[in-house]
Image (cartoon, helix red, strand yellow):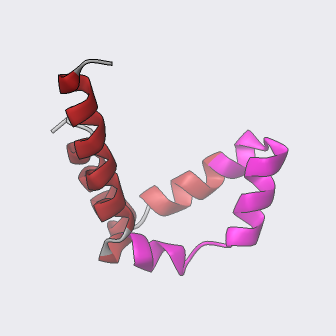
Amino acid sequence: MDLDALKRTVADSAALRAAAGSAEAKALANTLDTAALERAVKGGDSAAMGAALRQVLGTPEGKALAERLRKAMGDG
């Protein structure tokens, strides 16, 4: 990995941590059934994971968080 790639990785990591600690992320965490989501992830239940993602993206907070993540990953 070259120095520029390492810098991008560090910047992306910091941006993702900031997004994860955002008000949007915290509000969404309170609306999810985290136990059910964890079971879906561990069990590879893509339908349940997709449903949870649709639930999240269907809220104003989810849309704001998705936008923040898109920008953090350099797509915006």
Which range is magenta?
25-49
Say which of 50 and 70 sits in front.
70
Question: In the image, is 45 to the left or to the right of 17?
Answer: right
Residue 67 vertical placement versus 28 (above, below): above
Please tell me whether residue 41 belongs to the stretch shown in magenta.
yes
Seen from the viewer's position, the closer of residues 46 and 54 is 46
Question: Which residue is at 42% across, 77% downward?
Answer: 26
Identity of the residue drawn at 54% across and 61% down: 55
Q: Is residue 40 magenta?
A: yes
Foreground residue among 3 and 59:
3
Task: Answer with left or right where residue 21 lies relative to residue 53.
Answer: left
| Predominant SS along the magenta part | helix
Residue drawn at (49%, 61%), measured in percent from left and top? 56
From this viewpoint, which residue is outermost toward the right?
Answer: 43
* Residue 37 in the image: above or below residue 61: above
Residue 30 location, x and y as percent?
Answer: 53, 81
Residue 36: image location, x then y, percent: 76, 65
Q: Where 8 falls versus 63 (above or below)?
A: above
Residue under the point 77% across and 53% down: 40
